[in-house]
Every structure is written in C-alpha cells, then in structure tokens.
Image (cartoon, grey):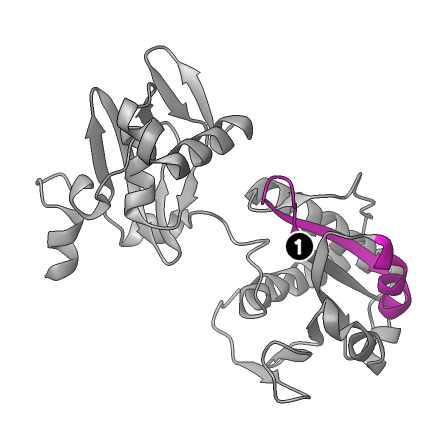
Amino acid sequence: MNKSATIKLFLPFGDAKSVRTAEISNWSGKAIAAPRSELDHFVAREELSKPGIYILIGVDPGSGSSMAYVGEAESVADRIKQHKSKDFWNSAIAFVSKDENLTKSHIRYLEGRLIQIAMDVGRYVVTNNQSSGAKLPESDLNDMEVFLERITQLLPVLGSELLTPVLDKSVVEQSQEVLVCKRNGAVANGIRTPNGFVILKGSTAVKELRQATKANGPWVINLRNQLVSNGSLVEKGEFLTFTKDVEFSSPSAAAAMVYASTAAGPVAWKNSSGQTLKELESN
C-alpha cells in the first residue's frame, strides 16, 4: 500500500486540544478525538452514534506508564459513556466509517488487531483483559487491514503512538547509522530517532551504579529500576542486557543507562569511524 497520505484536520471549536476530526483522502473512515474534559461535546457528535472502535488513553498514576483501553461498539458514544468509571483515561480517539459499511464483525476484528499490535509494540500498557477478534472473509479482511493502516497513520497525528514501533527497521536499514556506546566492558548499539534515541536489543549496560550516581543521579536509578521491573533490562553475567529495543528521550538518557551514571550522550555515542554524535550532527 502507498503510505503517502493527505490528511484533513478539522477543529470544530478552533482549539487543537479540544474536539478534532481527521480524514484521509480516498478513505472511507473518519477519526474523532477529544480530551476527557470535552466528553459531552465528543459523545454528542452524530458520527459516534455509529459502529466503530475507540481508544481510551491515560497514565498509570503508580508507575507513570502510558495506558490504553481498546474497545468496539455498535454505538461508540453510548459505550464511551459507560467508561466514566474508569479513572485512568484522559483522552479518547474513535474511528468510524463514513459510508456506514462497518459491521459488528468488522469492528470486532479491528479491535482484536489493535490490541495485538499495541501489545507487540509495547509503548502502552493495554488494560483489556482479552481481545474478542473475529474471522472475516478474505475480501473483508483485506479491507479491514487497509482500514487499520489508515488508523496507524492517523494516531500519531492525533497525539498517540500506541501503534508506532519503537524502531522502524526498514528506515534503519535504508538510512540510519548505528552508533556505539562503550563503558567498562559494556557495549550498546543505538540509533537517533524522531523522539530521541533507541538502544537496540542485545546491548549491554554496566550493572553496578557508581557511588556518585546514588547521591546525585536519582533519575538514573529510577529509570533503570523501571526498565528492570518491566523486563527491558535483565541481569546476564557481569552486565545488564537489553531484551528489546528501548527508546529514551535523549542520547544522554540512553548513555546514562549504559554508564550506570549520568553521561554526555552527544560524545558518548560514536560511529564505526570514531566520530561522536555531536560531530556527526554538526556536519
């Protein structure tokens, strides 16, 4: 499928943080998004009386992890009203069809696929207990996979990276240079990304925290503890090993995980010729 797209955004109240709709040229679907504070305006929209799928997005107050609930309903508005008792969510995004051709089987299929992909990507904790899913005829399945591709394109535009892989392998293979960070025998490979920096699966990090870090770098300790608790970092021999690609907000945050102490990422990460990230980005 051609991934290029012309997206039309509409702000009914002129506020980009209020209710907004999104459409893609030559696509039968439509997205509607809103913060929870605008719930009354959101569920009053005519489109949401139709069958569709929806995503509730928020943050776990305990861990600070992003959370999401994925659902389907023959009346999206009615179903979302029933979720007022869920405390975690602070925004909602819904997807419906403009031609009214989404059936119950279609939306159940889309719900199942969205949950599966979101769990595989791992950016959010998906709170659904299970995925219903549905089997579809071949032609319908193809149509819904196209619908899903468009949802994937629109979600980041509407403020959610629920389905966005931490690292796009095809982009890496085509253009990105893998950088290396070394410290006391630990070796990590990483790549600059639009959101910051990704340390690649299989990289290693220094296991023991420096005494100075314990006194002056509590954020390093907290972040490492979070990665250990969610299984992203595991103890393996003399080092900690990354079990998956992990994204950080900056090269320095990534290097700090490798060093087990604060670090200057722009000079800690180097290419195969020894040039630092700082030098590469100054060219």
**Residue span colored magenta:** 58-85
Position in image of residue 228 (x %, y %): 49, 26
Res 210 visible: no
- Quadrant in which residue 175 is drawn: bottom left
- Quadrant in which residue 52 is drawn: bottom right
Crowding around mark 1 (Cα neighbors within 10 Å: few <14, some 14 to 19, many 20+) is: many
Q: From the viewer's perspective, is 160 left or right of 241?
A: right
Q: Which residue is mark 1?
A: 58
Which is nearer the eye, 178 or 97? 178
Q: From the viewer's perspective, is 85 left or right of 9?
A: right
Res 9 visible: yes
Position in image of residue 88 (x %, y %): 73, 52
Which is nearer the eye, 71 or 99? 71
As displayed, is residue 154 above or below residue 18? above
Tag 1: amino acid: Gly
Residue at image point 41% right, 31% down = 221
